[in-house]
Amino acid sequence: MANIRSSALTLLCLPLWLLGGAATATPPVHDRVILVGDSTMASTTGYGDALCERFTSETACLNLARGGRSSGSFRAEGRWDEVTGLLRAGGYRRTFVLIQFGHNDQPGKPGRSTDYVTEFPANMQRYVIEARALGAVPVLVTPLTRRSFKGGYVQDDLAPWAATVRNIAAATATPLIELNALSLAAVQAMGPDEADKLARVGENFDRTHVGPLGARRFADIVAREIVRKVPQLADDLVAADGAGGAQ
């Protein structure tokens, strides 16, 4: 009985603010963005890091895209498990998961290629369902165009995969970033010589991956689409010049 009275007196002596803090934790106030995809989104070869730079310093942006991965191999290697682990851990007001695949799902890539009629849509839909089940906001991104010209026109060799992503977005009511069509139009307007300036320089030059200029150019496209298609994330963006409010 004496021990009970002693405990009660101890509680009475504690500051009220300390008791209140123990009872109610402050809810998270900042958002998080996770990028999931292939080399066209990954660090050093894609636009993902440049996109992360477009978010405010209070917004966590994790670029988990990896080169050479398809919608199937990203999961098979356990990389999606890393994403779901982060989602389960919480700690943020909201988490937005941007998902972009297609390049390595194309034929001719052993261990990575997927059938775009069956496997690719199933893989992409599964990402959406699982992210949403863990409380995240999935955002689908159509694949970044390649920059190869033929007869004066950009070769739209990713059209079937982009169309599949659009269909899944519509069927699952998932926000869609139309990077494929917008990047293709931008590259077409530049012409081949200007488009080549978006690539990495030297021995790493190709017309799929991007250097710093290309990364910024395509990150700008994605940021503008976020404002239009994911308005709840728009306030977390800053303009390309660092002033508030992405345009």
Image: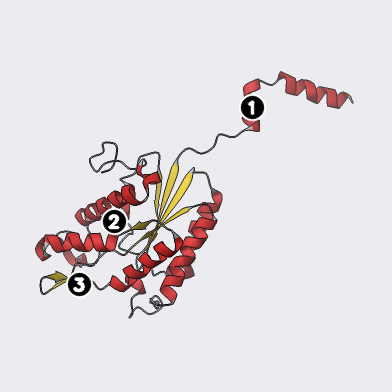
The three-letter code of the residue at mark 2 reads Tyr
The three-letter code of the residue at mark 3 reads Gln
Residue at mark 3:
155
Q: How far apart are marks 2 and 1 (CA)?
A: 45 Å
Instruction: Identify which residue, 177 or 35, lies in the foreground.
Output: 177
Q: In this view, does 79 lie above or below 217?
A: below
Circles 3 and 1 in contact, beta carbons < 8 Å: no
- Mark 3 neighbour class, 10 Å CA radius: few under 14, some 14 to 19, many 20 or more: some
- Image location (x, y in percent) of residue 137: 46, 53
Q: Let me know if residue 199 appears in the view.
A: no
Q: In this view, does 55 lie above or below 16?
A: below
- Image location (x, y in percent) of residue 122: 46, 71
For the point 25% across and 55% down, the residue is 218
Residue at mark 2:
47
Query: Which comes before the other along the chain, label 2 or label 1?
Result: 1
Instruction: Identify which residue, 148 or 8, lies in the foreground.
Output: 148
Q: Is mark 3 on a helix, strand or loop?
A: loop
- Image location (x, y in percent) of residue 79: 46, 63
The three-letter code of the residue at mark 1 reads Gly
Numbered mark located on residue 20 in the image: 1
- Mark 1 neighbour class, 10 Å CA radius: few under 14, some 14 to 19, many 20 or more: few
Query: Which comes before the other along the chain, label 3 or label 2?
Result: 2
Q: Quadrant of the C terminus?
A: top left
Instruction: Identify which residue, 17 or 202, lies in the foreground.
Output: 17
- Image location (x, y in percent) of residue 168: 41, 66
